Structures are given as structure tokens and as C-alpha cells.
Amino acid sequence: MIESTPPVSVGDYLSREGDVSGRQFQDHTFTLRGRDAIALAIRHFSLKERSTILFPGYLCPIILRGFSDRFNFEYYDTGRDFAIDAKAIEALLRSQNVKVLYLIHYFGFLHRNLEQLSRLCREHGVLLWEDHAHSGLSRISYDFADAMIFSFRKILPVPDGGGLWLRNTPPIKISNGGFASNVSSMLILAKRSKWAMSKGLRARTGQIARLSTASVHEGSKQIVPSRASYMSKRKVQSVDLERAFAGRRDIFGRWQHLLDGSRFEPVFAILPDDVCPQGFPIWIRNGRELVRSLQDFDVFLKVHWPLHARMKERCPTAFDVSQSIITLPIYPGLGERDMERILTLLGRYGEPLAAEGD
């Protein structure tokens, strides 16, 4: 079975061995998920109801759940290369009563105009929040953001775990949800490990994992932040980050080599030195249909992200990109045979889309 997220080894997860190279996250608050980190940031900055949050049009809809429906959402478009137009952002900051500019570093690739965007936010009294769910292992800068959101489970072999970094603020103690988080973590571990599980059992395990923390949020207008499970927090703090960084970059290079001369074009042709890739996105015409087809072969890829049709008018470029990308997996342990198998299935069921459009 091949998945888009790193498989979790039960033995490694339960092992107490490891160095402490993850100490770079010692100033972070560990949460159950990324959206718990968002909810914690909302509390920290005391965002008031109906505050306006400025989001990129290209985003995972789950992010919005961290904010609930108490806030006003406005959107800015991103380029086909995910670049952010600072002039367009400045115009929005002038015309809207924005409290937070939410920025996402896609697939591990870092925005190059952070300093300019940060300066605009300061000039307009706007908070800059960076989403590092995909880029937590890249060489990120802590010079610009007021808050940083992480989702360690997307880039490291742990079943749960998000994180929040706040400028000039020590880690926040979360007293809520410890037992539920540990139970949820073990259930997700079973779902994501290489144990033999039928598709039906995997689906049921996922439902139970979600229900294990549902009572924490029941009846609340916003998410009540839950802390990360004990084991996931410990594993993030002890993982060999340099090895993970090098391993992901190596697999990115292998995908480049395998796809060279094929019909499929990568979204990112060059891997900058400071980037640790979360995945290897390619341009494709039939992403959703391809994902469904490959599941019959126990290959579970991701479309990042299917956007609602109403976003087509608001953010046309972001919407078009969302319809044209599929992400190939990158994580330690992904072998050449698995990669070649995916490529064979792509050739059989995928419909390429040129990087510059039709």
C-alpha cells in the first residue's frame, strides 16, 4: 500500500531511542492538529467576532474550520507558480479592514517576498500568520511572522501533531484533551501503519479517531485546542531532522529523473537549497478521476486541493491550478519499485497537462 503521507512504524513510534535534533521546535506549542494551533492563535491574539481574515484562494478547506463561521473570510489570488502579488495584497489591505494575512508555503517551497509582505502588514497594523504545514522542515525564517502554524503529521512519521509558534511568546500550556489525544493518536497509528487492514476497517478506524475528540469541541462556537499526544510530541522532538531533510530532497530528485522525458510536467522544475519538499506535484488533467482509479491498486495519492466552484470567480488562477495538480508522495522509505509502479499507473490512467496550460 502506498500513501501520500509518511507511513508510521509502530516500533519507531513506541521506541524511546533518538537524539534531540528536533529541539529546534522547543519554542513551539504542540497541538493535536494544525487547526488546533489556529484556534490557539485566535485565542492568543483575542481576535474578535467578524474580524476579517485574508486567505489565499488556493487552500485546504479544513483550514477554515479552525476559524469557524464567526469571522469574515476574504481571498487573494495566487499565481500559477504560487507567487503572491504584493501590490494586490496592498490594495486589499487598504480596502478591507483586515486583521490577519494568512499565507501558505505550498509543498515546502518558501515564498520569496516575505520581507515585503511583512513590511506591508506592519504598515497596515495587520498580523502575518504563516502556514508551514507543508514546509516545516524547510529552512524557514522566524524574522517576519507573528504566528506560524505547523502540521507535523504531514511531513514526519507521526500519526498526529500540529504546532504553533508565536513571536516573543513561550510555549502555551494546554490543559485540555490529553487523554483523548493519546487515544486518537493510537487509532490513527493503526490506520496509517503498515498493518494489514481492509479498506472498510481503515475507514471505521478513522471515524473512531475523529469521534475520540469530538466531545471536546461539541457545542462550542470555535475549536477548543487539544494538545498533541505524548508520543507524537516526543517523536517530533527526537527525530533526525537533517536526515529527513536530505532524504526528502533525494526522493524529489529521483522523481525528477523518473519523469524526465515523460509526458508529465512537474510543477516545480528546480529545488532551491533551503527547501524540504512535502510532495512532488505534477500537472495533470484528470486528477480526481486518477486518484479514484489508483485506489484500486492500493495507491492513495492526494489532490491539493479541490476548491469549491464559487472560488472560480474570486480567485480564477488558484481555481484553475486546483483542478490541474496531483501530488506524488515523498517520504523516507519510498522505494524505487514503488515509484516506478506509480509512474506506470500514471502512464496508464493519467492525462498530462502542459505546465503552461493547454
Image: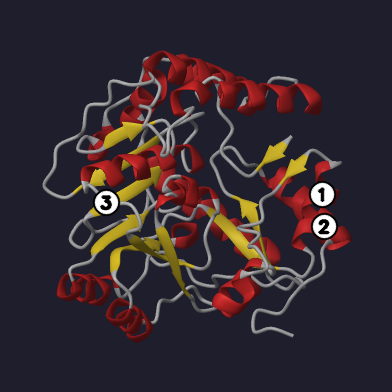
In this view, the residue in front, 229 or 124, is 124
Residue 231 in the image: above or below residue 78? above
Q: Which residue is mark 1?
A: 292
Answer with the quarter of the image where residue 225 lies.
Answer: top left
Residue at 52% x, 25% y: name it: 214
Asked whether disc 2 touches disc 1, contact meaning CB atoms under 8 Å apart, the reply is yes
Asked whether disc 3 touches disc 1, contact meaning CB atoms under 8 Å apart, the reply is no
Numbered mark located on residue 322 in the image: none
Kindly state the secondary structure of the residue where label 1 is placed. helix
Residue 322 seen by the camera: yes
Looking at the figure, which quarter contains the C terminus?
bottom right
Q: Which residue is mark 2?
A: 289
Kindly state the secondary structure of the residue where label 3 is placed. loop
The amino acid type of the residue labelled 1 equals Arg
Residue 96 in the image: above or below residue 191? below
At which x and y percent is residue 341? 78, 48
Residue at 48% x, 73% y: name it: 82
At which x and y percent is residue 153? 48, 37
Asked whether disc 3 touches disc 2, contact meaning CB atoms under 8 Å apart, the reply is no
At which x and y percent is residue 218? 49, 27
The amino acid type of the residue labelled 2 equals Glu
Q: How is the image coloured?
A: secondary structure
Q: Which residue is mark 3?
A: 47
**Mark 3 or 1 closer to N-term?**
3
At which x and y percent is residue 134? 46, 52
In this view, the residue in front, 120 or 330, is 120
In this view, the residue in front, 115 or 169, is 169
**Mark 3 or 2 closer to N-term?**
3
Query: What is the count of numbered marks?
Result: 3
Q: Residue furthest left?
A: 168
Residue 39 in the image: above or below residue 315? above
Mark 2 neighbour density, 10 Å: few (under 14) some (14–19) many (20 or more): few
